[in-house]
Amino acid sequence: MLERHAAGDALPSILSEVLAALALRPDAGERLTVTGAENLPSCFPVTALATAAIGAAGVAVSELLGLFGHAPEVTVDRHLASAWFGTSLRPCGWTIPAAWDPIAGDYRTADGWIRLHTNAPHHRAAALAVLDCPGERDTVAAALAGKAAEPLEAAILRAGGCAAAMRSPEAWQRLDQGQAVRVEPLVSIAAMSGHGPSRWRPDSARPLAGIRVLDLTRILAGPVATRFLAGLGADVLRIDPPDWDEPSMAPDITLGKRCTRLDLHRAADRRQFETLLAEADILVHGYRPGALERLGYGEAGRRALNPNLIDVALCAYGWTGPWASRRGFDSLVQMATGIAAAGQRWKQADRPVPLPVQALDHATGYLMAAASLRGLIARLRDGQAVTAKLSLARTAGLLTDHAGGAPGSAFSGYQDRDFAPEIEHTAWGHALRLHGPLRIDGAPLRWDRPACALGSTEAAQVLHFAGASNRPGAVRHGR
């Protein structure tokens, strides 16, 4: 890897671990150049993680193209990598909705802290049912103040909600779950023989043109992965249930995608889903372990419908151990794994201090994209069908194993020059989008569709992947 980095920068070590986890060639990283020296403020090397995750995805693209020709050089801009881990969108004359529900957040308990995640209405209802109080922040704080954090966490989870008590890094490592995640691979890759050779070949200018991606993910890692794949030319179709929405996230993460809705409890929708799954090259999903099985689409069932499928899966707390099926989000995993407690110590603060961005989500998203590309490499080179599994908690381990921010200048914030000049005509209004953080020689990131609302494509328009609706003008974000 060619780079400008200060002594003590964790980037080379993190990148080496990531490339090894993806089973990419040891010399693949030599095609990566890193520019810039800024760092997000944290007791952990967040910008190094961002740069390594994005860089690994770029190196995977280069490896894919190298199967049939020249393997291009790859460059990552540290400043833009940090920026994309925040938000990539600047609205022009309109405002993105608030990211958090009014009662979501950190609360002091009798013995520490707990975080409630209440953005989804049913998660909010579950927390309030356990606390037996109105949905106002002061009353929620009062209800939590006299109780112990871990029993509260357990009660809210049993009720179908989302919460995490703040644990120290040492406490997390002592937990059975912490020990289980510790021995899981960063990217678990399993391969089996596919059925027949693939006639698809990557295009040097649009590496994933012709690749069909079925996206069954929600906030935030999975959508980051499929947004990246769309930027390489993949046809990404996101499917949500009828009642799901992400108003604060959709403008950022639906870039390049079509979004529809299916109810997998309805026979007609199940038939349509099975047709789409059979046609897909890549499935990216973020359901908790066992959830797709309960819908009748377990791993064996997915393979029966599509033996050549590249199957990339995400969960929150790891694929083994007692918490394997626990629902969770980035901010909760930060609390559970000791990241927020370590930040509190570092800042000498009187409350939890999370990472400056949702780095576990974003990093895991780029690793999922890289795993998808690794699956394409295995399919073309070896005739294999790949299954990859990742988790937010395991990515947290990658970060916390390299504690200590790198020396150098602090992240300078979003600058006007960071944004591409083209106007993006999103579903909510005009916007500017950041320049891509990654440059692949000859194959700039470019998204063919602006950001759209969830469910904005009628299901009848996507009976097959080939039934695409008219494409709006392309939005280019490569430098």
Image: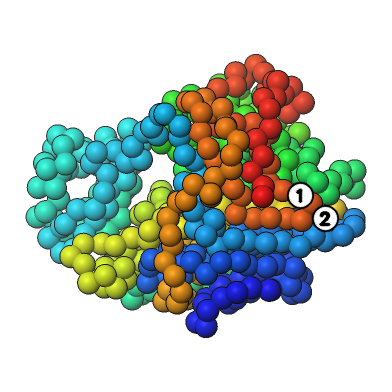
Pick the residue in front: 209 or 33: 33
Q: Where is residue 69 in the image (x, y as percent from the top left)?
A: 90, 57
Count neighbours of disc 1 (C-alpha within 10 A) and say few if under 14, some if 14 to 19, many if 20 or more: many
Q: Position of residue 76 (x, y in %)?
A: 63, 61
Pick the residue in front: 120 or 309: 120
When the figure is inspected, residue 279 is found, relative to residue 62, above or below; the finding is above
| Image quadrant containing the N terminus | bottom right
Which residue sits at x=70%, y=20%? 470
| Total residue callouts | 2
Pick the residue in front: 364 or 35: 35
Pick the residue in front: 96 or 26: 96
Mark 1 or 2, closer to the camera:
1
Q: Find numbered disc 2 in the image and state the secondary structure of the residue it sits on.
A: helix
Question: Is 452 left, or right, of 144 in this rendering?
Answer: right
Residue at the disc numbered 1 = 443
Which residue sits at x=57%, y=32%? 424
Judge whether residue 197 can be spotted in this image. yes
Earlier in the chain: of badge 1 and badge 2, it is 2
Q: Are marks 1 and 2 in contact (CB under 8 Å)?
A: yes
How far is mark 1 from mark 2, CA to CA?
10 Å
Q: Find numbered disc 1 in the image and state the secondary structure of the residue it sits on.
A: loop
Count neighbours of disc 2 (C-alpha within 10 A) and say few if under 14, some if 14 to 19, many if 20 or more: many
**Mark seen at residue 428:** none
Quarter of the image for residue 306 reads top right
Judge whether residue 193 can be spotted in this image. no
Q: The residue under label 1 is which amino acid type?
A: Ala
Q: Where is residue 381 in the image (x, y as percent from the top left)?
A: 86, 58
Q: The residue under label 2 is which amino acid type?
A: Leu
Which residue sits at x=56%, y=76%? 5
**Mark seen at residue 65:** 2
Q: Where is residue 314 in the image (x, y as percent from the top left)?
A: 55, 51
Which residue sits at x=51%, y=28%? 430
